[in-house]
Image: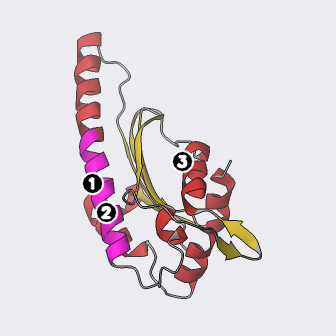
Amino acid sequence: ENCGSVMAKRTVNLSGLKNKSKKFIKYISTNTAEKLCLYAERLLEKAYSEKKFENDTYNLADSYFWVVFVDGVKYRHGFLGDKKADEPSKWHKQDIHGRERAGSAISGYKPTIKEGVEVVIGAAAPYGGALEYRNITVISSIFDEMTDDFGSKHIKKIGFNEFESWLT
């Protein structure tokens, strides 16, 4: 399966806790979310540094993104640096604007857990998955590290078709 994105999930069940405990858990979740934002940003930079493609228009790099959700609500998101592509790339005769696609993926994604934190790291340009399919690393190099950090049952590779369904 080609890889459009890598996602990490960790669920925290808050049912049955008293209000003070819930406030403490909320504090821990926020602190965890801050750490996960730094983690996602670092992993995104690592994935790009390990890429195996040429970056002619910068649109693929421009489409790299991360987003952290807390209790099913977007907490924060980011992109690979501040540089943006000057012109679109072409994919099947269609203009591709990497940053716009990343923004659409972030807004179109529906978190799968309602209590806890969720991290999504991806590359939204449609040809990213095609490159991965041809064993040209775009973002998959971080999958093993995320699996080591979170455990294999909490990590999911997202195929291209599922990823495309997020775009708004």
Q: Please, what is the three-letter code of the amino acid marked with disc 3? A: Ile
Query: Of the residues shown, which amino acid type is indicated by label 2?
Result: Leu
Spatial CA distance of label 3 from label 2 is: 17 Å
Image coordinates for residue 146, horizontal then vertical, percent? 32, 63
Residue at the extreme right of the image, as rendered: 93
Q: Quadrant of the N terminus?
A: bottom right
- On the image, the x and y values in percent for residue 116 come to 37, 36
Q: Mark 1 sits on what residue?
A: 39
Main SS, magenta region, reads helix
Of 125 and 157, nearer the camera is: 125
141 is higher (above) or lower (below) than 21: below
Neighbour tally class for label 3: few under 14, some 14-19, many 20 plus, Cα within 10 Å: many
Image point (26%, 18%), residue name: 23
Of labels 3 and 1, earlier in sequence is 1
The answer for how far apart the CA atoms under marks 1 and 2 are is 6 Å
Name the one closer to the observer, 113 or 34.
34
Q: Check contact, mark 1 vs mark 2: CB within 8 A.
A: yes
Q: Mark 2 sits on what residue? A: 43
Q: Which residues are magenta?
A: 34-49
Quarter-of-image position of residue 80: bottom left
Q: Is residue 154 left or right of residue 149?
A: right
What residue is rendered at 66% in x and 52% in y?
167
Q: CA distance from mark 3 to mark 1?
A: 17 Å
Residue 125 lies, in percent from the top left, at 59, 67
Image coords of residue 160 (percent x, y):
62, 67
